[in-house]
Amino acid sequence: MNSIVKTFTAAVMGLGLLAGCTNLPSDSTRLTERTAPITMNSVVFSDYNLSRTWDGGIFGDGERYRLTVAQHGQRATATGTTEVYAVLRNHTDYDYQVEARTQFFDQDGVPADVKPTWQRLTVSANSLATYRELSTSTQPLQYRVEVRELN
Amino acid sequence: MFRKTTLKTVCALATASLVLSGCASNIDNAKGKPSVYEDVSTTGSVGGVGIESQDVVAVTDKMMRDMLANPLLTGRSTPPRIIIDNEYIKNESTSVVNTNMLTDRLRIELNRAANGRMIFVGRHFSDMVQKERDLKRDGTVDGGTIRKTAAQAGADFRLGGRISSLDAIDRNTGTQSRYSQISFEMVDLELGTIVWSGLYEMRKAARDNVVYR
């Protein structure tokens, strides 16, 4: 009876350890984002410490995040240029200093507009922050926003 | 016996002097560290609290995009004539910065991106233009191939601005903090009204003793 209890305890502890192993680290090569196809009109975290997902682990798919994208979109300004916005949500108890940039592409997917520049942004603990970027061109554009933690 | 001991001593001395002679050379025959190119839009290996390349790039990029979204500047049927130079940009901050870096990058990037929506007057080149005009009017040179105008172009708007800062030092840790504020305003050169304003602010803290030149 005693040995059954011991085996059961060991099995529970082992499972507990394995459950801990299912959290893939940010430098893992098995993260979904590393090989995900490039999509237009999207916001991505290029820093996997902020957000990452994986599939096919011991306990199936997994996800780990500190920041998420609450919403994003684009609209035309009064002069015909494009304004892109992304609302970031901080799920942690700590302020996060991040930087974001927008790459613009024309309707054929060809890179357009000027060279993107990183813009700093603070997302306060458990709060929202909005990133905005303007294009310089008046042609219809698609966008891809990249977010990373400030170095 | 005596000769054997002497021989051993001489050998030991000779070995020691050979080893020491290796240390005596002043030449450090090692490969040098090559220069490293760094991305101008990110913080480099040397960073302090002053205005640095990434700030110049970020400020001018933000202002350029903002100006192009302003209907008073780019929504006109006739493109406005604009002067962007450092004549009316004042550096009142403790940061050592050449304000030409801000105005030159802003004008050039804006001129490239505006693509005819704004016309830039090169007032800082007016001497050069006047000399050539005088030569043409004197008959020293011919009239060129473009056109003749009564005078050089007058401008509709001109950029003014200011850089200011607020410093703080923690004497216990040596940490230095600087809040910098860079403001730009586009002024109507007939009315004196301000048709566009842009503000960029940042606060940096560092313990490194970086010297800006």
Image (tube, coloured by chain):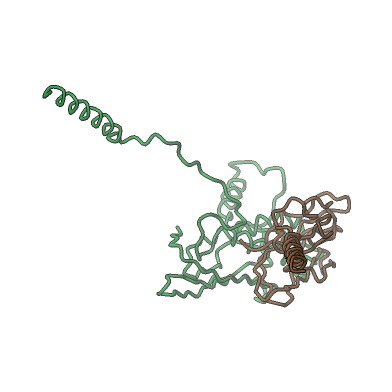
- The image shows residue A70, relative to residue A26, as above or below, that is below
Q: Chain in green? A: B
Farthest right residue in view: A107
Chain A takes which shade in the image? brown
How many numbered discs sit on the rendered protein?
A: 0
Residue placed most toward the observer, A77 or B76: A77
Q: Is residue A120 left or right of residue A77?
A: left
Asked whether B171 or A33 is in front, the reply is A33
Query: Which part of the image, by quadrant, shows the C terminus of chain A?
Result: bottom right
Compared to B188, does B149 lie above or below?
above
Q: Quadrant of residue B113?
A: bottom right
- Describe residue A74's horizontal placement relative to residue B172 as left or right: right
The quarter holding residue B101 reads bottom right
Place of residue B178 in the rendered image (x, y in percent of width and height, measured from the top left)? 51, 71
Q: Residue at x 30, y 33 (%)?
A: B25
Please name whichever residue, B120 or A74, is drawn nearer the observer in this view of the structure. Answer: A74
Where, quadrant-wise, is the N terminus of chain A in this rendering?
bottom right
Q: Nearer the viewer, residue B206 or A134?
A: B206
* Residue B189 visible in the displayed image: no
Q: Quadrant of residue A132?
A: bottom right
In the rendered image, residue A118, in percent from the top left (x then y), is placed at: 67, 60
Q: What residue is rendered at 54% in x and 45% in y?
A: B36
Image position, residue B114 (x, y; %)? 74, 58
Position of residue B180 in the picture relative to residue B114 (left or right): left
Residue lying furthest front = A1
